[in-house]
Image (spheres, rainbow, N blue to C red):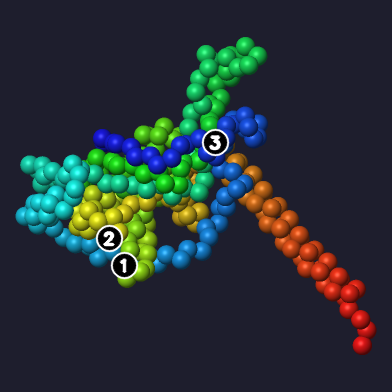
Amino acid sequence: LNECMTWGSSTSSGYCSDSDSDSEFEQYFTARTSFFPKLRKDNDEQIEWSKQELTTADTQQKVKEYNAQINSNLFMNMNKDGSYTGFIKVQFKLARPVSVPTPKKGGNDAGGRRASGVKRRTSFYLPKDASKHLHISSRTSAREVIEALLKKFTVVDNPGKFALFERSERHDQVYIRKLSDTEHPLRLRLCAGPNEKILSFVLKENETGEVNWHAFSMPELKNFLRILQREEEEHIKQIVQRYALARTRMQEALTGSTPG
């Protein structure tokens, strides 16, 4: 896979290292985000072109039409075996930080002692407007696209935490559909054409209910449980404060009211 990266802002915002928060060497999520997905206003809908069957002649014609519509050098190219290559653009819509290996500093810690073999990780937030172009084949699966994106940014998080979605705007409505691991994004791009409003790709966190928890390591699962506890405590605190405020206002109203 060949890649070219497009950035819109710096990755410095939201930066946090493993030494800035907890003593844990591995940080995967923070309490600022929730495990429970928020209600989404977007509509889920099966996109028609995902079901299109193309012959070799159909593919050649579509590649020709696609290349005639673009104003860049991001062309699609046919191969002798009937496959084709081209570019897809993936937008990052990640609410949680990603983990990358902490840069090595001579192999010694601050006290001059040798590292104990524990792999330290640094977490940071990717810019909300970050996007990336990938040069892929028509045989490249959605799962392989996710793995390529993580590899490019040296992200060490489990690929199972992420999912690739297709986004479409039609009739003032936004439609979102999660791609299965075996679908081929470049084929969807060819069938939809180059217009990003008709079809675009988005990398997001996998919804909690669909994650295979058995695929994660023990340190990851322990961190998940800690974050769940933090969120629960934060929600309880907010509810208690809200009711306490309402009770205070009611008491103030009672005190200020006159009998009769």
Q: Residue furthest top?
A: 112
Q: Position of residue 20 (x, y in %)?
A: 63, 32
Residue 179 appears in the picture as rendered: no
User: Mark 1, residues whose alpha carbon is within 10 Å: few (<14), some, or many (≥20)?
Assistant: few
Q: Amino acid at mark 3?
A: Tyr
Check disc 2 and give the amino acid type. Answer: Ile
- In which quarter of the view is residue 47 placed? bottom left
The numbered mark, 3 or 2, whose residue comes first in the sequence reads: 3
- Mark 1 lies on residue: 170
* Residue lying at 34% horizontally and 39% vertically, measured from the top left: 6
Q: Residue 53: percent from the left, percent from the top?
A: 16, 60
What residue occupies the far right of the structure in this picture?
259
* Numbered tag placed on residue 97 in the rendering: none
Q: Mark 3–mark 2 contact, CB under 8 Å?
A: no
Q: Residues within 10 Å of mark 2 (few under 14, many from 20)?
A: some
* Contact flag, marks 2 and 1 (Cβ < 8 Å): yes
Decide if residue 148 is on the left or right side of residue 208: left
Give the residue drawn at x 12%, y 52%.
68
Q: Secondary structure at mark 3?
A: loop
Q: Mark 3 — residue?
A: 15
Query: What is the secondary structure assignment of the residue under circle 2?
Result: loop
Query: Mark 2 highlights which residue?
Result: 198
User: Is 93 rendered above or below residue 98?
Assistant: below
- 108 up-or-down from 172: above or below: above
Pick whichever of labels 1 and 3 is earlier in the sequence: 3
Q: Pick the quarter of the image with the C terminus.
A: bottom right
